[in-house]
Image (cartoon, helix red, strand yellow):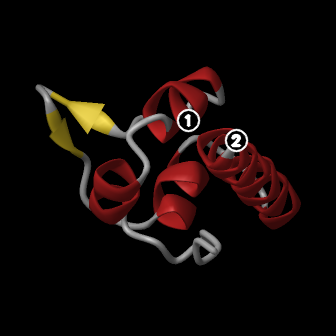
Amino acid sequence: MEEKVNKDVTIEELVIKYPDSVKFLMDKGIKCIACGEPVWGTLEENAKEKGMDDESIEQVVEELNEKIVKKAHKKEE
């Protein structure tokens, strides 16, 4: 089973491990790619730059983990 993503994951690690997270984060207004390279910093730092509070960040992390689990289950089928 994949380990869960948390708010302290670096954007670079997130993009490398879960490339599908890029679209999800962009849909949430969180910039994660600039000129084809991952943005520096953590998920939390980049979310706070977009004005998200702690509750909103936790919601993003929860939704992201749900998407990762769903994708992992589809691969297993």
Question: Which SS class for mark 2?
Answer: loop
Q: Nearer the viewer, residue 31 or 52?
A: 31
Q: Nearer the viewer, residue 75 or 28?
A: 75
At x 52%, y 77%, the residue is 8
Left or right: where 49 falls relative to 16: right
Q: Position of residue 73 (x, y in %)?
A: 72, 49
Task: Give the label on residue 25, or none.
Answer: 1
Three-letter amino acid code of the residue under disc 1 = Leu
Q: Could you tell me residue 11's position as x and y percent?
A: 36, 57
Label 2 belongs to which residue?
Answer: 77
Q: Earlier in the sequence, mark 1 or mark 2?
A: 1
How packed mark 2 is, by other alpha carbons closer than 10 Å (few <14, some 14-19, many 20 or more), is: few
Q: Amino acid at mark 2?
A: Glu
Q: Quadrant of residue 4?
A: bottom right
The image shows residue 17 at horizontal and vertical percentages of 36, 57
Please, what secondary structure does the residue beneath circle 1 have?
helix
On screen, residue 32 versus residue 54, left or right, reads left
| Quarter location, residue 40 | bottom left
**Residue 70 pos. (x, y %):** 75, 44
Question: Label 1 neighbourhood size at 10 Å, few (<14), some (14-19), many (20+)?
Answer: some
